[in-house]
Amino acid sequence: MAKDIFQRVADEARPPAVLGRYPGIPDYFNDVLLDDLVESGAWLDLELKRPFLALWVNSKDFDNPDWEDPIIGHTQKNVRKFAAMDPVVDLESLRGMKVKLVYDD
């Protein structure tokens, strides 16, 4: 069975997270997942943590976020917090990283 990167992150994080726990805001499911990981102090294997964080680092808006949007501002802080959690990830090292979005189980 194939899983997208977000479901795999939710399943493999310790403690695990619940993907899509706010179904009314589907556009921000990844931001909610990241917030859950930060708030719970979740550990994630480096092989999965790096591509997960690379999705934000390599988005066109990462370097010039809309700071007026409170969700974007909160997510920007969470990306940096999660990167600093064990195992630590250098966000700059993720620039240009190609990310596989779907994984086979």
Image (cartoon, rainbow, N blue to C red):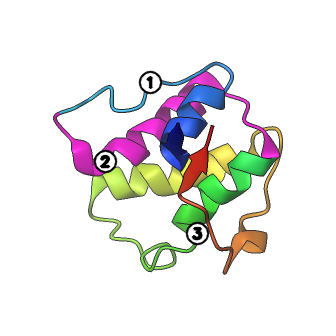
Q: Amino acid at mark 3?
A: Val
Q: Check disc 1 and report its element: helix, strand or loop.
A: loop
Please tell me whether mark 1 or mark 3 is closer to you in this view.
1
Q: Check disc 3 and report its element: helix, strand or loop.
A: helix
Residue closer to the observer: 76 or 30? 30
Disc 2 crowd, CA 10 A, few/some/many (<14, 14-19, 20+): some
Query: As drawn, is 94 to the left or to the right of 88?
Result: left
- CA gap between label 1 and label 3 equals 23 Å
Report the magenta residues as a range.
24-46
Quadrant of the drawing holding the C terminus: top right
Query: At 34% across and 42% down in the image, what residue appears?
Result: 29
Disc 3 crowd, CA 10 A, few/some/many (<14, 14-19, 20+): many
- CA gap between label 2 and label 1 equals 14 Å
State the residue position of label 2.
Answer: 28
Q: Amino acid at mark 2?
A: Tyr
| Disc on the earlier residue, 2 or 1 | 1
